[in-house]
């Protein structure tokens, strides 16, 4: 076993049975009953004894329409965006190649780089999680990364970096820049998809998990056809199963359902942010995602206190110096948000 693999810690997912689950940035709303019933009938007709069509043309058409991907660009389907991250890392893992990413950010950027045998370099964000463009460009010039990951909005901080800073990094980079727009539904239209194809080294990665389809595990890379043709060589055959494909094809044709849920989450984010900020000793960081990062006086104690009272959030204390005593809370339903506020107030008191 490689030493760097032995030194890693596996991606941890907390057991959530019986808890109000506000730890994983999931959409808290289930499908409407009639749509769920129709999906059940649709899936019952799927021939699960047959392999999926590896090209998944119908699913790609549905994804292209849902994300308004122009015909000039191509798409790569993944088993969640995590698989896309792994494929991109493997494709660029020449001996000595470096991966660069702002930190703190999504931990899988680092995991995928190390798994592929690449050198990983984290670029520290400011104390308020802003990106210093000048220092970032200097890091790009110094490290000459084969791959740079930029989360837009960032996870776990929730903030949006300046679009101009991202594009400056693209122009300055000798390698590929992959912009991860996992939380684009909640970001008020912030995206760099319109720049894909205008810059030869830019791709965008997205997922349908945060939108409300986390259980289907469907991610996508949007890039010029030349990039997708190379990445396809590393995509395992049949990586999107027939049930996920059939469900996604059907559900992506119902955008109004997810639009209403997204609007409810964004409204809930604003209400929850104000309520959290009103609690003594709590600092709330602005978010353009479906979660909110907060700093409390004692994050481990607050985390355990919430869990003992039936609410699961994410404790980031100890994972990065900028995240000392930070908790990340997913925006839930109005009832879940109200329960979180009341419970956290009691725990802090």
Image (tube, grey):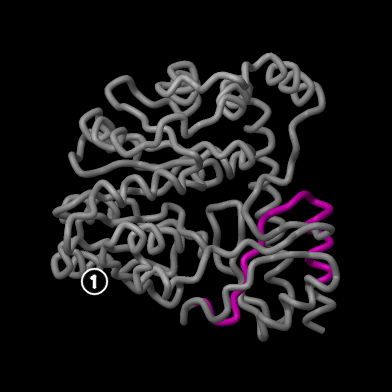
Is 230 left, or right, of 22 in this rendering? left
Closest to the observer: 230 or 176? 230
Can you give x and y, in whole percent of width and height, for residue 321 in the image?
A: 46, 82
Can you identify the residue that label 1 sits on?
135
Q: In this view, does 165 lie above or below 32?
A: below
Is 210 left, or right, of 221 in this rendering? right
Q: Which span of residues is magenta-colored?
A: 323-343
Q: In this view, does 293 lie above or below 84?
A: below
Which element type, helix, strand or loop, lies under badge 1? helix
Can you give x and y, in whole percent of width and height, for residue 106 in the image?
A: 46, 60
Is 76 left, or right, of 307 in this rendering? left
Q: Quadrant of residue 139?
A: bottom left
Closest to the observer: 15 or 320? 15
Residue depicted at x 62% and y 26%:
243
Can you give x and y, in whole percent of width and height, for residue 109 in the image?
A: 39, 59
Residue depicted at x 61% and y 42%:
214
């Amino acid at each position: 076993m490689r030493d760097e693999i032995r030194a890693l810690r596996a991606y941890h997912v907390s057991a959530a049975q019986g808890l109000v689950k506000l730890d994983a940035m999931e959409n808290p709303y289930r499908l409407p009953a009639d749509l769920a019933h129709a999906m059940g009938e649709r899936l019952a007709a799927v021939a699960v004894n047959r392999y999926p069509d590896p090209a998944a043309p119908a699913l790609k058409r549905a994804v292209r329409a849902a994300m308004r991907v122009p015909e000039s660009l191509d798409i790569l389907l993944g088993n969640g965006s995590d698989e896309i991250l792994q494929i991109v890392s493997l494709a660029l893992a020449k001996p000595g190649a470096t991966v660069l990413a702002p930190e703190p950010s999504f931990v899988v950027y680092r995991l995928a780089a190390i798994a592929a045998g690449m050198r990983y370099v984290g670029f520290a964000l400011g104390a308020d999680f802003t990106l210093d463009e000048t220092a970032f460009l200097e890091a790009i010039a110094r490290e000459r990364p084969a791959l740079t990951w930029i989360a837009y909005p960032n996870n776990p901080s929730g903030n949006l970096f300046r679009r101009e800073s991202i594009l400056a990094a693209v122009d300055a980079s000798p390698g590929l820049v992959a912009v991860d727009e996992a939380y684009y539904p909640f970001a008020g239209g912030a995206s760099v998809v319109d720049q894909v194809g205008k810059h030869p080294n830019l791709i965008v990665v997205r997922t349908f998990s945060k939108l409300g389809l986390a259980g289907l595990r469907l991610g996508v890379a949007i890039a010029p056809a030349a990039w997708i043709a190379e990445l396809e060589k590393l995509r395992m055959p049949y990586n999107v199963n027939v049930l996920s494909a059939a469900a996604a094809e059907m559900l992506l044709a119902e955008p109004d359902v997810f639009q209403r849920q997204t609007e409810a989450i964004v409204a809930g984010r604003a209400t929850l942010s104000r309520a959290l900020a009103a609690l003594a000793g709590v600092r709330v960081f602005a978010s353009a995602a479906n979660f909110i990062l907060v700093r409390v006086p004692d994050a481990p104690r607050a985390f355990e206190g919430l869990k003992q009272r039936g609410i699961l959030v994410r404790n980031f204390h100890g994972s990065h110096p900028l995240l000392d005593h930070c908790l990340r809370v997913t925006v839930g339903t109005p009832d879940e948000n109200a329960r979180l506020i009341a419970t956290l107030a009691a725990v802090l008191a």
